[in-house]
Amino acid sequence: MKELWVEAYRPKKLDEYVFKDKNQRQKIDKWISEGALPHMLLSGPPGTGKSTLIKVLLNELGIDPFDVLEVNASNHNDVDFIRETVTRFSETMGYGEMKYVFLDEADYLSHNAQATLRGTMEKYSNNVRFLLTCNKLNKIMPALRSRCSGGQMVIEKSDLSDFYTRIIKILDAENIKINPEALEDIVKKTYPDLRRAISLSQSNSLNGELILPTDTNDGLSCEVDMVVLFRSKKFKEARQLICTELNLDEHEEMFTFMYQNIDIWADGNELKEDRCIMAIRDGLVNHSLVSDTEINLSATLCELEIIAKEKE
């Protein structure tokens, strides 16, 4: 496994990228011919090619790497990072006429970070363009969306047949014998996330053949262990496990888990169930506003524990 297939088969040129919307391709051709991109905001499900399209466009324009600041906002999402890194980058002279800030997964930016970014976009718009991607458009504040209105695009998921075709082409290129059952299982687990499908296909290609994935746990990374602790009423231990083992990009998914397993805390009591729903709702609202999502998640779990321990 010398190279990750996700990177090896990532489109490098515009002609290699598959557009679902012809109007999007026409707009992009116009921007390329003009030699610069507007502020852009690409939204859509994970793994549908948003980040890839941004990188293809920068490559097509021949932008010097020193004129590009690429940031994964799921890891750097607070206001200090915007001020100390993004704004400082925007202030400096570039090698070319235009510099670009690529903020991947911008929906993870805190409310204050987005507010600060808005000011930076306004101040340096003449020589810096901001390229944002997000999975959930509603988590991007309206003021940022309006500044990207000229370059806002929804990247739709691939048709299921195209999804299959893309994976099969990669497997053929790697001389991997296709097990139809394994291929169907991988697609079932990953669609429409093509990036994840390609990674899972590579990890399950052994001795020149595609095999069935052995990991059947498609939920949160520590779901089995935390459910055992919750069911045993070991709330503190479960909370510590979650904060230690859960990935940052799984924090929001945890709120869905809490809602779907509300009986852990409500234990069949309708009043407690109502209060738990409101606590989960408040935690989810705060999730996009706070700078530290782990603290917010932990606080929500504490509220649920308090409700669970109250006597009826």
Image (tube, helix red, strand yellow):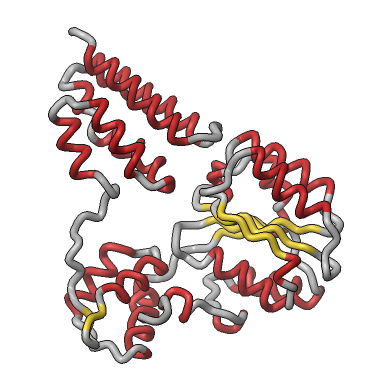
Residue 67 found in image quarter? bottom right
Left or right of 115 on screen, residue 282: left
Residue 23: x %, y % from top left: 64, 70
| Residue at 28% from the left image edge and 37% from the top image edge | 241
Residue 55: x %, y % from top left: 61, 70
Q: Is residue 171 above or below residue 117?
A: below
| Residue at 34% from the left image edge and 22% from the top image edge | 302
Left or right of 307 on screen, residue 85: right
Residue 252 found in image quarter? top left
Q: Is residue 300 above or below residue 121?
A: above
Hey, which residue is sitting farthest top in the picture? 311
All told, the count of numbered labels is 0
Q: Is residue 15 above or below residue 163?
A: below
Residue 291: x %, y % from top left: 55, 35
Q: Nearer the viewer, residue 126 or 281?
A: 126
Residue 240 found in image quarter? top left
| Residue at 67% from the left image edge and 76% from the top image edge | 59
| Residue at 40% from the left image edge and 25% from the top image edge | 299
Residue 33: x %, y % from top left: 78, 78
Q: Quick one: quadrant of the N terminus? A: bottom left
Q: Quick one: quadrant of the C terminus? A: top left
